[in-house]
Image: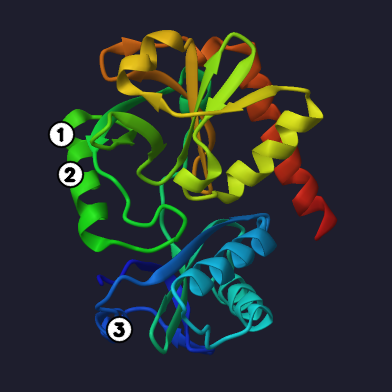
Amino acid sequence: MINEAVGKYLIFNGEIEEVGLNEYFEEITNNPLYEVITVVQGIPVFFEEHMDRLVHTAELLDLELKRSVEEIKQDFYHVISANEMKEGYIKLVISDDIHLVYQYWDQGPSQQLIDEGIEVSIFDYERANPNAKIFYTNFKAEVAKYLIQTRAYEALLRNEEGELLEGSKTNLYFTSKDKVITAPDDRVLKGITRTRLEKIFEKNNIEVEKRIIRDIDLVEVDGAFISGTTVGVLPIRSIESIVLNSQNSELIKKIIKGYQELQQEYIDERK
C-alpha cells in the first residue's frame, strides 16, 4: 500500500510517529479494513456510526480488533491535535496487527458541484462482499483511471445483470416525482451518510422505495444523487449520455439541506 498520509504526524499502533516513512504502509500487503471520517471544526463527524460499521465488518470477516473503539477515538483526536486540523479527513486502516490513523487528502466537492450537479460514468464491476468495508487496491486504481478517461466525478457500478446498485465509493439514489429509490440494504454497503439520510427521509415524510434500478430502467427516473463521507450529498447532472435535472429538483435540494443541518447539529453537540 502506498503512503497516502498528509500532515506531519500519524498514529501507528497507538504511538504518534512522523509522516514520511513508508515502512508503515509497506507492511500492509493484503486487503485491509478501513474507515474515512470527515473532520469539521476539529470534530470527527459521525464517529460512532463509523465505529459501529468497523466492528460489524470485523465480525463479518471474523477478525479481532487489536484496539478498542475508545482507543481509536483517542488516536483520531491525537492526529487532529498534532496536525492542527480544523477541516479535512482522517483515515483508519487495519491490517493484521497494524492500526494506522492518519490525515488523508480527498478533494471534497465544491459549492459549484453541489449547485450544478456532477457527471457520472458506468463501470462494470460487482463487489464480492458489499456489506464489508474493505480496501481493494487494484479496484481503486482501475476506477481512478476510468474516471480520468471518462472525465466523470464518480463511477456507478454495474453488475452482469445490468443492476446499478451504488457508486465506487458512494451510495446511489434515484428519484421519480416525489419518491426516492435506492437499492435494498443487503445489496450495498450501509454507508454512514446513507444511515443519516434515512432519518431525513422520515423527518420530511419522503417516500422511499428500496428496489433495484437497472441500466435499462434509467428512462423511468427524473433525478439521481450520491451520498458518502467525503462528498456529503451530490446531485447527478448526467449519467453518461442521459441528462437529468437533479440539480434543480426541489426534493433533492431539501435532502441536501437536511443533511447539512444534521451534520452541523452533530458538531454543535460536541463543541
Marks 2 and 3, how far apart in space? 27 Å
Query: Dot 1: within a 10 Å radius of its alpha carbon, few (fewer than 14), some, or many (20 or more) residues?
Result: few
Query: Dot 2: within a 10 Å radius of its alpha carbon, few (fewer than 14), some, or many (20 or more) residues?
Result: few
Give how far across and how far down residue 225 sits, in percent: 49, 27
Tags 3 and 1 touching, CB below 8 Å? no
Which label number is shown at residue 21? 3
- What residue sits right under mark 2 in the picture? 145
Q: Please, what secondary structure does the residue beneath circle 2 have?
A: helix
Screen quadrant of the C terminus? bottom right
What's the residue at 27%, 85% (across, down)?
A: 27
Of 111 and 227, nearer the camera is 227
Kind of residue at badge 2: Lys
Which label number is shown at residue 192? none
Would you identify the image quadrant in which residue 148 lies? top left
Q: Is residue 43 visible?
A: no
What's the residue at 52%, 38% (across, down)?
A: 184
Kind of residue at badge 3: Leu
Is 101 on the left-hand or right-hand side of 51? left
Marks 3 and 1, how far apart in space? 32 Å
What's the residue at 31%, 21% (across, down)?
A: 215
Q: Is residue 4 visible?
A: yes
What's the residue at 57%, 86% (across, down)?
A: 67
Tags 1 and 2 touching, CB below 8 Å? yes
Would you identify the image quadrant in which residue 6 lies? bottom left
Q: Is residue 111 above or below residue 143?
A: above
Marks 1 and 2, how far apart in space? 6 Å
Kind of residue at badge 1: Gln
Give how far across and how far down residue 49 sits, in percent: 65, 59
Please give the count of numbered marks on the rendered protein.
3
- What residue sits right under mark 1 in the picture? 149
Q: Earlier in the sequence, mark 2 or mark 3?
A: 3
Is 97 on the left-hand or right-hand side of 49? left
